Structures are given as C-alpha cells and as structure tokens.
Image (cartoon, grey):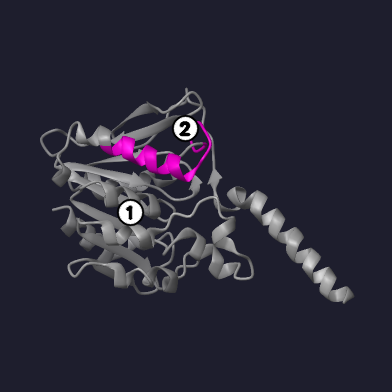
Amino acid sequence: MYWVKLLLVIYAVAGTALYFVQDKLLLHPVAVDADSAYAFREPHRELFLPFDSATRLHVVQFTVPDSLRKGVALYFHGNKTNISRYAPYAGTFTRNGYEVWMIDYPGFGKSTGTVSEPLLYESALQLYKLARASYSTEQIVIYGKSLGTGIAAELAAVRDCRQLILETPYYGLSALVGSYLWMYPVSRMMHLQLPTYQYLPKVTAPVTIFHGTKDELIPYRNAAKLKPLLKKQDRFISVEGGKHNNLLNDSLVQRTLDSLLK
C-alpha cells in the first residue's frame, strides 16, 4: 500500500505540474521590440491589428509587384519563436504571384496579449477580413504549418477560400498530446484543443495535406487519422522520410505547391 500511495502522489503531483506549465511546454514564443525592424530579404510591409486593450496583433505582408499579383496566402505558423522563423518560406508563394501575410500569435514577436483558443480563431478571422477588402475568395489561400494547421482549418471551415493547405497537421492537439500522456485525461486538462478533425468535414474548399512519414513531433499516424475526413478531390500527400521541418525542401512538395498556385 505504501508504494501504491506513493505512485498516486507522484501521479497527482506530475499531473498538476503539467496542467500549470502546459503552455510553456507547447508554446515557445520569442518577443521582439515593437519598434525594431525585421531585415527580411523579401519585400514586405508591417502592420498591427488592434484587438483589445491588452492585445495587438502584428502582421508581416510579403508583397509581389502589382503586375504579377494573383492572390494572397494567409499563413498561420508553428509554435516557435515568431514570424522571423517562417519568413524564409514566403518565397514559395511570392514566386508564384501570391502575397504572403503572416500573423504572430499573442506573445510572439511584436504581438501582445495572452494566447487563448478563441483569440487564435478570432485573430485568424480578422486577418481574413483584411484580405477580403482587397481579394476575392478565389484569390485567398489559407495555409497552416504545425500548430497553425488547426487555426487554418477552423478558418476555412467558416470562410470560403481557394484552397486550404496543411503542412504537418495533427488530428487534434489534445489527441496528439494524449498519445504521449495517455495516463492522464488530457482532453479535460488542455487549454488549447484545436480539434482539426472537427473542422475538416466543414471545409468546402479543396484541401491538400503534406506530412512526412518520419515526422518526429507530430507522428504520421496521428495526421493519417484525418484521411477519412477528406473529400474525394482532396489530397493527403505522404512524404517518404520527411520530417517536421524539412517538407518544403522536398521536390514533390514544391511541385505540388507550384501547381496549386498556378
């Protein structure tokens, strides 16, 4: 009985600790001084979307010449640092005539505020509304990378777009974490649920998913659970040997993206 009690105490203490530090384990933002300037090679402009007294969301718009511009890709990035980590990917879109608008989540980069699931969805919607002021729905591509795939899927479920593209998605964030912490009721503990599986069936636009078979962060088997939720014309592209952060180096992925953005 002593050992049973000790294990129960350890279980309870570890679970309590995980509950209170989960955001630090999942999110790794790096703040940037709002007055500083990014030195991106791609032409760009910066703007802020005011949300409330505590929250101001920073957006970087990677631009293309008016004569070449065909549309805009709304890019929702992963869980690390800020826009500067994902800026090198802008060229995939701009060379195809698409502007890329990247938004930093609260606490990331120059954005202020505190992350919450409703705020993530609402900030994505505000970015979409900004895009609709200049572009038709057929000119808007919604793109999600890693953490951003659940946000992108939710937006595409409630707003029309040309294409939804998900790079290294998860079935649901709580389902992903639960696969590692199976001994805890993760679905009731998580602050962020991001249930991609609930949103995909509501997306009317074409969907393309890229996932590496050797993804070390979001296991392929977790993302593969999304396959039955796709429409007949949607595509789930498995990248043999692909990992979490190298898919855009794959020639098949690049050819597919070029084709989607034609």
Q: Position of residue 222 (x, y in %)?
A: 44, 70
Picture residue at 28% right of the left edge, 62% below the top? 201
Q: Position of residue 9 (x, y in %)?
A: 80, 64
Q: Horizontal placement of 126 versus 68: left or right?
A: right
Q: Is residue 162 above or below residue 46?
A: below
Packing grade of label 2 (10 A; few <14, some 14-19, many >=20) is: many
- The magenta segment is 107-128
The residue shown at (43%, 38%) is 104
Picture residue at 65% right of the left edge, 50% below the top: 21
Tell me the quadrant of the picture where the N terminus can be found. Answer: bottom right
Q: Is residue 219 above or below residue 36?
A: below
Could you give the CA–CA distance between mark 1 and mark 2, rounded to whole angstroms? 22 Å
- Structural crowding at the residue carrying mark 1, measured as other residues with C-alpha within 10 Å and reported as few (<14), some (14–19) or many (≥20): many
Secondary structure under badge 2? loop
Q: Quadrant of residue 208?
A: bottom left
Mark 1 vs mark 2, foreground winner is 1
Judged from this view, the residue extending furthest toward the right is: 2
**Going by the picture, which residue comes out furthest to the left?**
67
Q: Position of residue 225 (x, y in %)?
A: 38, 72
Q: Amino acid at mark 1?
A: Ala
Quadrant assignment, res 250: bottom left
- Residue 65 appears anywhere in the view: yes
Could one spot residue 38 in this view of the protein?
Answer: no
Please name the residue that numbered disc 1 is placed on. Answer: 153
According to the picture, the residue beneath numbered tag 2 turns out to be 111
Question: Quick check: marks 1 and 2 in contact, CB under 8 Å?
Answer: no
Q: Residue at x 16, y 43 (%)?
A: 137
Residue 67 in the magenta stretch? The answer is: no
Confirm whether the magenta stretch covers residue 123: yes
Q: Is residue 192 above or below residue 33?
A: below
**Which is more toward the observer, 156 or 165?**
156
